[in-house]
Image (cartoon, helix red, strand yellow):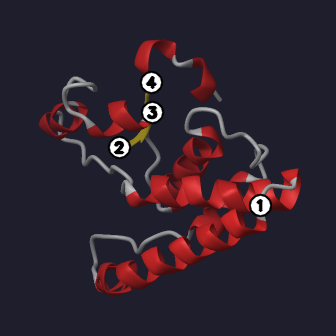
Amino acid sequence: VGVVGEILVKYSPTANNDIVRLLEEEGAEAVVPDIVGFMNYSLYNQIWKYENMGMSKQSKRLAEFAIKIIELVEKPMDKALRKSVRFDGIHSIYDMAADASKILSIGNHTGEGWFLTAEMIELLKHEVNNIVCMQPFGCLPNHI
């Protein structure tokens, strides 16, 4: 069962009523996307803003550089995960944006914006067919 949603509620057992433990006690395998993906999402938005809203080219370059550094740091872990039988590799933020753009605008930056949809798509692509979407108090920016 994939666990996605607003960043605090997704990762904090206190905020999500310990959903991972609950799912595992019920016999499910919980799949929680990594938090670095959210950092990449925030960086990717700067690239989009440059390309579509005339924002600073320097912000775009810094974001691209930061994404490359993150990918470089993650490369050994990604390699190990891809060799594993039980885990998938790390997903490229560029691929996730391309997939999400088929469903909604990548200009959707409010809340978790397009990234929430992108995480769901990645889970579905990797045969995680049940997803819990964690939202605090019906958080309207994240409704899809």
CA–CA distance in space, label 1 to label 3: 28 Å
Q: Amino acid at mark 1?
A: Ser
Q: x%, y% of residue 124? A: 53, 53
CA–CA distance in space, label 4 to label 3: 6 Å
Q: Amino acid at mark 2?
A: Val
Task: Specify which label sits upstream in the sequence, 2 or 3.
Answer: 2
Question: Is residue 143 depicted above or below 89 in this figure?
Answer: above
CA–CA distance in space, label 4 to label 1: 32 Å
Q: Which residue is mark 4?
A: 135
Residue at x 31% of width, y 78% of height? 81
Which of discs 4 and 2 lies nearer the camera? The answer is: 4
Q: Which residue is mark 1?
A: 56
Q: Which residue is mark 3?
A: 6
Q: Which of the 4 image quarters holds residue 50?
A: bottom right
Q: Amino acid at mark 3?
A: Glu
Q: Dots 4 and 3: beta carbons under 8 Å?
A: yes
Mark 4 Cα-neighbour bin, 10 Å: few <14, some 14–19, many ≥20: many
